[in-house]
Structures are given as structure tokens and as C-alpha cells.
Image (cartoon, grey):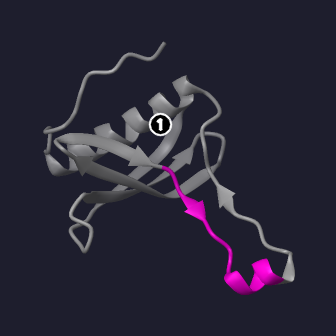
Amino acid sequence: MKFRKINVHPLRGADPRLRAVANILTADGYAINGIRVYEDKGKMYVRFPIVHSEARAWKAGRAANFAFTPCTHAARREIEGAILEAYKMKTGNVAGFEQRSVQ
């Protein structure tokens, strides 16, 4: 998968584990916004966005949740690796990063 742009926005807020929010644009023109980068017990990980619909719409029976989830393990690793590498380059923070291999 090729990425046209990866924007990482480092954060410090209410959640002490949340380190950044990332947005990516693929070479095919797909944008994935709101990907969160967390650090827990010294390890960095990525959570993909889920958009919950409003409670009023659920009661009316016309709501749905939307989520982005990579279809394969290799695709997930590739996206995670690109985002974590961009985070590392932007912040200089190398704690919690492990060398991973895509199979």
C-alpha cells in the first residue's frame, strides 16, 4: 500500500496514554482520519476510528456504526508501521517501538 500523505498530530490531554492522532491519505485517494496512537506500559499501538451514530437515530431504527478496519494482517501492519514511523520522526520518541516483520 502506498501513502500519499501521513499527518501526525502529537497530543497531551485528558487520556495519559493517548500520544497522537494521525490522518493518512493513500495513493488511491482514500483518506482515513482520526487514527489514534497510544502508549501503554512502554509499548506503542494504533487504534482505528469507529464513528458511533446518535442515540436518537438508533431509536428510529435507521442508524449504523461506521468503522475502518484493515482487511488483512499485513495491511494492518503496514498502516501501523507507517503511522508509528511518522510519529517517531515527528516527535523523536523511540520508546516503545519494536522492529516488526510483515508476513
Residue 66, percent from left and from top = 68, 60
Q: Magenta includes 55? A: yes
Of 85 and 62, nearer the camera is: 62
How many labels, in total? Answer: 1
Residue under numbered circle 1: 79
Q: Which image quadrant is residue 99 in?
A: top left
**Residue lying furthest bottom:** 56
Residue type for callout 1: Ile
Residue 40, percent from left and from top = 23, 48
Of 4 and 41, nearer the camera is: 41
The residue positioned 74% from the left and 87% from the top of the image is 56
**Residue lying furthest front:** 59
Q: Relative to 66, does residue 38 appear above or below in the rendering?
A: above
The N terminus sits in image quarter: top right
Q: Which residues fall within the magenta stretch? A: 48-59
Q: Relative to 10, does residue 62 appear above or below in the rendering?
A: below
Residue 31, percent from left and from top = 59, 54
The residue positioned 68% from the left and 81% from the top of the image is 54
Secondary structure type for disc 1? helix
Q: Which image quadrant is residue 26 in?
A: top right
In screen coordinates, is 47 left or right of 95? right
